[in-house]
Image (spheres, grey):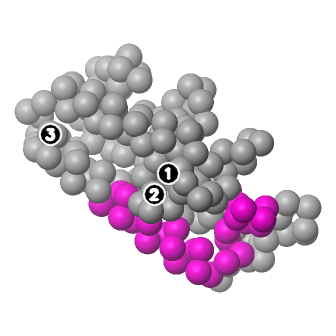
């Protein structure tokens, strides 16, 4: 993570971004990083799928720690800088399409889950923004919500664990 961030800062000094490193593990992928931001919403990685859980799984805990470790790097590399730093986070629709309930159904089907996950993610992003402001006061937090599955969510073309397709979202 340190080498990746140093490279980003060297190559893109005017708008450095917080790199994702999915090859390191599921906790560094798009869904895992979002899981690390969720507030009071435990997830676990089981059989290659993110699912709801009674308590945070080891990969969610790793993702939380990765955010904290990366923040230390960001603050040390960009200390005193007065510039924006872009942070990419999985958007709620892609997250909801990728996370399943304990019974194996996509959370996207449950309106209550949509509300809860969206609120939890928003709280986590606000918390990260506050941590960045405290650790590196000159940095301006620029959020990029990544929604690679948004078109499929809107079109209703995502498979639903062998039960057909997830319904389109208006």
Q: Which residue is mark 2?
A: 38
The extreme top residue here reads: 3
Q: Main secondary structure of the magenta part?
A: helix
Q: Nearer the viewer, mark 2 or mark 1?
A: 2
Callout 2: 10 Å neighbours few (<14), some, many (20+)?
many
Q: How many marks?
A: 3
Give residue 168's quadrant in the image.
Answer: bottom right
Q: Are marks 3 and 1 in contact (CB under 8 Å)?
A: no
Lower position in the chain sequence, tag 3 or tag 1: 1
Query: Residue at 46% across / 47% down in the picture?
Result: 36
Q: Which residue is mark 3?
A: 136
Q: Are marks 2 and 3 in contact (CB under 8 Å)?
A: no
Residue nearest the observer in this picture, 63 or 77? 63
The extreme front residue here reads: 54
- Identify the image quadrant of the N terminus: top left
- Between the residue at mark 2 and the residue at mark 1, the CA separation in whole angstroms equals 7 Å
- Identify the image quadrant of the C terminus: bottom right
Residue 142 magenta-highlighted: no
The relative height of residue 143 versus residue 114 in the rendered view (above or below) is above
Q: Which residue is mark 1?
A: 34
Give residue 26's quadrant in the image.
Answer: top right
The relative height of residue 96 versus residue 144 in the rendered view (above or below) is below
Query: Residue at 13% across / 30% down in the picture?
Result: 79
Specify start and end residues of the magenta stretch as a single range: 98-126
The relative height of residue 88 versus residue 42 in the rendered view (above or below) is above
> Residue 10, which numbered label?
none
Residue 100 magenta-highlighted: yes
Lower position in the chain sequence, tag 2 or tag 3: 2
Q: Are marks 2 and 1 in contact (CB under 8 Å)?
A: yes
Please, what secondary structure does the residue beneath circle 2 have? loop
- Between the residue at mark 3 and the residue at mark 1, the CA separation in whole angstroms equals 22 Å
């Amino acid at each position: 993570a340190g080498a990746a961030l140093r490279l980003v800062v060297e190559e893109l000094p005017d708008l450095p971004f917080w790199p994702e490193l999915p090859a390191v593990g599921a906790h560094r992928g798009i869904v895992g990083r979002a899981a690390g931001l969720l507030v009071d919403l435990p997830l676990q990685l089981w059989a290659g799928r993110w699912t709801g859980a009674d308590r945070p799984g080891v990969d969610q805990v790793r993702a939380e720690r990765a955010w904290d470790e990366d923040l230390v790097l960001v603050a040390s590399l960009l200390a005193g800088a007065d510039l924006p730093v872009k942070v990419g986070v999985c958007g709620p629709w892609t997250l909801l399409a990728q996370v399943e309930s304990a019974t194996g159904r996509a959370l996207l089907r449950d309106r209550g889950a949509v509300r809860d996950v969206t609120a939890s993610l928003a709280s986590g992003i606000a918390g990260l923004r506050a941590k960045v402001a405290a650790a590196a006061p000159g940095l301006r937090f620029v959020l990029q919500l990544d929604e690679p599955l948004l078109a499929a969510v809107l079109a209703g073309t995502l498979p639903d664990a062998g039960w057909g397709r997830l319904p389109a979202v208006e």
